[in-house]
Amino acid sequence: MNRGGLFRPHLAFSARRMGEPDEARSARERADRFRLIILPHMDAAYNLARYLTRDPSTAEDIVQDAFLRAYRGFDDWRGDSPKAWLLTIVRNCFLTSVGAHREKAVATADIDALGATSALADPVDERTPEAIVADRCEAAMLRNTIENLPEPFREALVLRELEELSYKEIAAITHVPIGTVMSRLARARQMLAELLLPHVGTPREARS
């Protein structure tokens, strides 16, 4: 066995790596870290953008812009939750796309006391076709109902219930106190229940 021959490709590869300029190697390592840390949260980024914009095409544009910004500013990431960091950028891109007047509208709408496309293949579904269709209809109805909520409440609900971020992370992303986040979530859940179950709590006489 020619052991020397087996190791020649490895040695040649190492030589190329060793001869790689420091700047190029640093850029490559940075890109590798970005792919490893940030890219797994692409679905979450699209999910948030989709609910904020209520338009798939616009959501794709915002996610693309967000990933470009994230890559350019990756050195500013301080090692905290990469998902929360990326979603903050997504939200900022959304705000930029709709204009500064939106922040004022959110403050006015706030009651202060109100999918996603996956890049991975779905597992084999053993349910009946009827059950699959029924579940898809329910999912579509739920998505449409959430999209009809006023923006600050829709945003809080998506970040908490769908993306499972902490109150602290949501507060940091939306730039509001934790108490306001909790108020928005409570109101969003109430609105969602009223929209999905419009007859709950209605007097019997009114329903007859």
Image (spheres, rainbow, N blue to C red):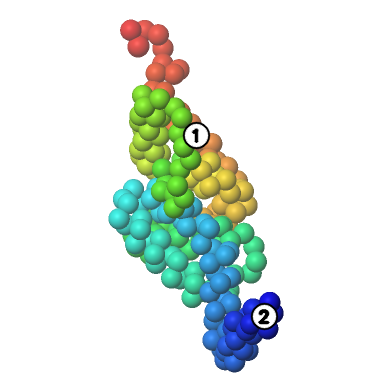
- The residue positioned 58% from the left and 49% from the top of the image is 165
* C-alpha gap between disc 1 and disc 2: 69 Å
| Disc number for residue 189 | 1
Quadrant hosting residue 57? bottom left
Residue 107 location in percent, x, y? Answer: 44, 51
Residue 85, how many percent across, how many down? Answer: 55, 62
Q: Nearer the viewer, residue 128 or 155?
A: 128
Look at discs 1 and 2 and give the one toward the viewer.
2
For marks 1 and 2, the one nearer the N-term is 2
Q: Position of residue 65 (x, y in %)?
A: 39, 67
Nearer to the camera, 124 or 112: 124
In contact (CB < 8 Å): disc 1 and disc 2: no
Q: Using the image, determine if residue 10 lies above or below residue 159.
A: below
Q: Which residue is mark 2?
A: 2
Q: Quadrant of the N terminus?
A: bottom right
Splitting the image into 4 quarters, where does residue 36 fall?
Answer: bottom right
Q: Amino acid at mark 1?
A: Arg
